């Protein structure tokens, strides 16, 4: 097979394949996106060829004498690609599912909106739908969201989006999937050839979280001089918990200060609280049909929500502060004309720090870290001021409000703080919260396509903003403004404000000239 040197220019984004070093970083960033779209298009081409060969060898041909025609077809795929028959059978199954059940979703692969990996997620989350009319409606709605919603999709966030649509169209399928999954719970072991082995346990998601937390809590009781890495400590701690044997620090120091509890009593003696965050609405909790969302597990059925709420160790907390009247009620300037309830967002004594209710609300709203591609839980993430809070001159810094706060994993937060990237957060014409990231060379990367406001629309009607005694909402900073002081941090904040203002002007000019994006 000859080398493929005549790729269409769209795959290269203006980069000379013979001299890639002649193109700048921004151009190569655009090329990354073009390559990703090209990979999706090639995956679509493979599915198309698989379907054509399937029709030629299976549908339009009589069965074979020794080997059925389907096996003949799969064998061709696996031997040409040098993969296993199981993998080839997966390819064929995916192609048939997309053609026969999700033809509109298949076009998003052709157009580079989804990758093959994400397409597999859509297939797997809709495979229990047997009603042809329901699957057709799902196909249409999923494709519409993928084409109209700005932003990036990661596997857990796409999974959650599909699950909420599946539950809306066929709640029995979600309930049935949970029953089937629970029926498959169990424990298995496997011996490896090198003297080690593996133990696997399948159980309810909430029980997994509790068990994992107990293992990590025991593993973290060793001193800082223990020579094992985290995975090794977790393995030893799990064995100690399962067998009731001793778990020791292995630092080998006589003055070791580690205080390690008895594994048999670790649940009581390890001072840690296992918290599983479940988000739902009051109507679902009271018995109405609906969905819930579990931190780390995604969408769950209404029955599952109520089962968790009835646990003796559960605590039900509203997302709005108890016994705190709203600061004001406003009508949002969006097509729906929603009434927005505004609560205090910053602590009165320290306007930089959000109130506990505001911090909880932002994590509930975001669900995950807002960094593109990150699936870290918002409840394990830091809260970041999108437009930086200026400690030197708070009136010029970003507001401590839910509209200017989002969740970032620790790496994302540190990268934002010490790096040269900027991010913006705003609401589009439909009222959706949009995040964008701008690299130091000016390349714009879209943030998440959805957050939990799309699961629970009432969240969109809640705002946390600064109390009256806090500094006022900052004015618009232009590129001509000078920093209030000459220190490095002030210069950095001023530069980022100018970049945001310029980014806003560019976006408005682009949308005015080109209209809304095609997808």
Image (cartoon, helix red, strand yellow):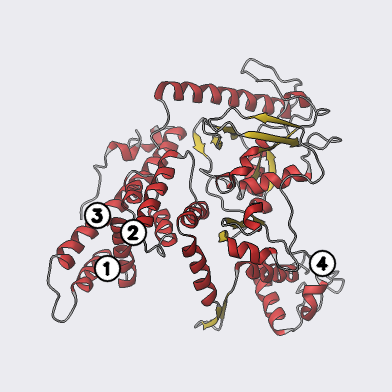
The earlier-in-sequence mark between 1 and 3 is: 3
Element on which disc 1 rests: helix
Q: Position of residue 435 (x, y in %)?
A: 56, 37
Q: Categorize mark 2 by other alpha carbons within 10 Å: few (<14), some (14-19), many (20+).
A: few
Element on which disc 2 rests: helix
Q: Nearer the viewer, mark 4 or mark 1?
A: 4
Q: Categorize mark 4 by other alpha carbons within 10 Å: few (<14), some (14-19), many (20+).
A: few
> Left or right: where does residue 350 sit relative to residue 473?
right
Q: Quadrant of the N terminus?
A: bottom left
Disc 4 to disc 3, how far (Cα)?
57 Å
Q: Nearer the viewer, mark 1 or mark 3?
A: 3
Query: Circle 3 is placed at which residue position?
Result: 48
Disc 2 to disc 4, how far (Cα)?
52 Å
Query: Circle 1 is placed at which residue position?
Result: 78
Q: Categorize mark 1 by other alpha carbons within 10 Å: few (<14), some (14-19), many (20+).
A: some
Element on which disc 3 rests: helix
Taking the spot 60% from the left edge, 67% from the top edge, the residue there is: 205
The earlier-in-sequence mark between 4 and 1 is: 1
Taking the spot 16% from the left edge, 82% from the top edge, the residue there is: 66
Disc 2 to disc 3, how far (Cα)?
22 Å
Query: Circle 2 is placed at which residue position?
Result: 132
The earlier-in-sequence mark between 2 and 1 is: 1
Q: Position of residue 161 (x, y in %)?
A: 50, 51
Q: Quadrant of residue 79?
A: bottom left
Measured along the vertical axis of the image, is residue 314 above or below residue 322?
A: below
Query: Circle 4 is placed at which residue position?
Result: 271
Disc 1 to disc 3, how far (Cα)?
16 Å
Taking the spot 34% from the left edge, 54% from the top edge, the residue there is: 102
The earlier-in-sequence mark between 2 and 3 is: 3
> Left or right: where does residue 300 sit relative to residue 143?
right
């Amino acid at each position: 097979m000859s080398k493929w040197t005549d790729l269409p220019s769209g795959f290269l984004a203006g980069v000379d394949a013979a001299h890639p070093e002649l193109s700048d970083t921004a151009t190569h960033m655009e090329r990354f996106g073009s390559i990703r779209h090209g990979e999706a298009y090639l995956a679509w081409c493979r599915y198309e060829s698989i379907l054509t060969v399937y029709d030629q060898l299976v549908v339009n041909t009589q069965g074979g004498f020794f080997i059925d025609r389907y096996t003949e077809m799969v064998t061709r795929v696996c031997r040409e690609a040098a993969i296993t028959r199981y993998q080839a059978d997966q390819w064929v199954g995916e192609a048939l599912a997309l053609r026969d059940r999700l033809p509109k979703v298949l076009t998003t692969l052709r157009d580079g909106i989804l990758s093959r990996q994400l397409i597999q997620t859509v297939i797997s989350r809709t495979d229990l739908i047997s009603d042809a009319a329901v699957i057709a409606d799902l196909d249409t709605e999923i494709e519409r969201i993928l084409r109209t919603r700005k932003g990036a999709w990661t596997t857990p966030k796409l999974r959650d989006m599909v699950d909420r649509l599946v539950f809306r169209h066929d709640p029995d399928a979600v309930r049935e999937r949970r029953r089937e999954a629970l029926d498959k719970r169990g424990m298995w072991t496997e011996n490896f050839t090198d003297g080690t082995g593996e133990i696997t346990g399948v159980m309810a998601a909430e029980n997994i979280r509790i068990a994992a937390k107990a293992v990590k809590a025991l593993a973290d009781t060793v001193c800082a001089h223990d020579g094992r890495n985290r995975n090794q400590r977790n393995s030893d701690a799990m064995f100690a918990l399962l067998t009731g044997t001793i778990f020791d620090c292995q630092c080998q120091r006589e003055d070791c200060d580690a205080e390690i509890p008895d594994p048999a009593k670790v649940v009581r003696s390890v001072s840690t609280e296992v918290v599983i965050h479940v988000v739902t609405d009051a109507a679902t909790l009271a018995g109405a049909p609906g969905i819930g969302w579990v931190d780390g597990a995604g969408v769950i059925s209404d029955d599952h929500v109520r089962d968790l709420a009835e646990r003796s160790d559960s605590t039900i907390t509203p997302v709005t502060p108890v016994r705190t009247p709203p600061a004001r009620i406003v009508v949002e300037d969006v097509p729906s004309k929603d009434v927005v309830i505004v609560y205090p967002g910053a602590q009165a004594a320290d306007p930089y720090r959000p109130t506990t209710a505001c911090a909880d609300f932002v994590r509930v709203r975001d669900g995950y870290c807002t960094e593109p591609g990150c699936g870290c839980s918002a409840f394990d993430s830091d809260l970041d001021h999108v437009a930086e809070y200026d400690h030197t001159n708070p009136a010029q810094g970003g507001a401590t409000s839910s509209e200017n706060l989002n969740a970032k994993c620790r790496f994302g937060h540190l990268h934002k703080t010490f790096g040269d990237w900027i991010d913006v957060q705003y609401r589009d014409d439909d009222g959706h919260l949009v995040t964008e990231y701008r690299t130091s060379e000016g390349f714009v990367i879209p943030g998440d396509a959805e957050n939990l406001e799309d699961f629970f629309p009432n969240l969109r009607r809640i705002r946390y903003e600064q109390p009256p005694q806090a500094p006022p909402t900052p004015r618009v900073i232009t590129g001509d403004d000078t920093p209030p002081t000459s220190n490095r941090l002030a210069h950095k904040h001023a530069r980022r404000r100018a970049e945001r203002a310029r980014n806003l002007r560019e976006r408005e000019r682009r949308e005015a000239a080109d209209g809304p994006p095609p997808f």
